Amino acid sequence: MAPHHLQMGLLKVLPGTAISRATDEFGLVSSATPPYSVLATRWLEHADLRRLFWLGECLEGFYNNRFFRNTLDYIRKTGEEPFAFFAQLLSICQAADFFSLAKTQELMTRMLVELAQARPDRELFCELLRFDWLVSGQRLLPPGLVAEPSKEIRDYLWHHLPEGNPPHYTRLTRNEFFKRGIFARFSGTLLKAVGLVEDDSFPGGYVCFLPEQEHVAGHQRQRHAVFFV
């Protein structure tokens, strides 16, 4: 369904409610202090619920901030089982003590780059992460996603693109366009995955990320991306 926000949490057993008087019937064990979260039931042991709690924290961190919009859209569109995906990501995060650290975009990207190493689509997955990093407003790529420098691509396109290329720039605004843009090269597979081309056989091309931001659902805004052959 591709919702803008997902929340996964544990049931609460508030004191004085009907369910709080049925703890024996359901085998409910809950915290005695707020928020009174369920710790175990007849059907789910404490270890199971503990794992589900941290899975919810993982989902909150990586899905709801919208940093990885294209990467997670790709997971959904290819039919990959999302629970298995986030369960694997959770294992990597717990091994890195992720939940005790500041959840920066760079740290989360590092967790996903590590996840990519065991995937058969590793190259495309890392390309998606690189695209999401640049379209979210970042300029310098983090370790693990470094590719051809933007300046070298800018110099190449400066000599190969026409003097005027409406609606992106005119002869008079050409200098400003190249000064403000961040440039990267992507495969045709990536360009199709993010909706910039429709042809499966497209060999690849260049994308310029511009400071102008376009509104996306939810609170986050994204850089505008311009595609060039």
Image: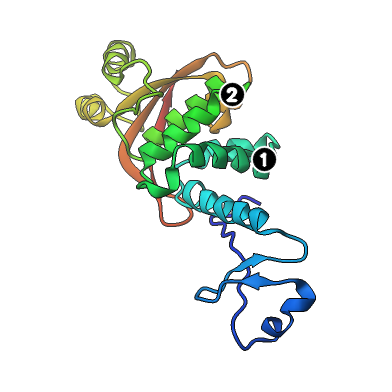
Callout 2: SS: loop
User: Which residue is the extreme one toward the bottom?
Assistant: 16
Q: Residues within 10 Å of mark 2 (few under 14, many from 20)?
A: few
Identify the disc placed on residue 206. Answer: none
Return the disc, 2 or 1, that comes first in the chain's sequence: 1
Q: Residues within 10 Å of mark 1 (few under 14, many from 20)?
A: few
Q: Say what amino acid the circle numbered 2 marks.
A: Ala
On screen, residue 201 versus residue 229, left or right, reads: right
User: Is residue 224 in sight in this rendering?
Assistant: no
Q: Which quadrant of the figure has residue 98? A: top left
Q: Residue placed at 62% from the left, 15% from the top? A: 201
On screen, residue 56 above or below 120: below
Residue that numbered label 1 is attached to: 84
Q: x and y percent of residue 45 in the render? A: 70, 58
Q: Is residue 7 above or below residue 154?
A: below
Displayed quadrant of residue 125: top right
Q: Secondary structure at mark 1?
A: helix
Q: CA distance from mark 2 to mark 1?
A: 14 Å
When the figure is inspected, residue 151 is found, relative to residue 27, above or below; the finding is: above
- Please provide percent x and percent y for residue 166: 35, 29
Residue at 35% from the left image edge and 15% from the top image edge? 148
Residue 145 visible in rendering: yes
List x then y, in percent, for residue 86. 60, 42
Residue at (52%, 48%) from the top-left corner? 58
Q: Position of residue 18 (x, y in %)?
A: 70, 86
Q: Which residue is mark 2?
A: 118
Q: Tell whether 154 sits left or right of 27.
A: left
Q: How is the image coloured?
A: rainbow
**118 and 213: which is toward the camera:** 118
- Amino acid at dot 1: Ala
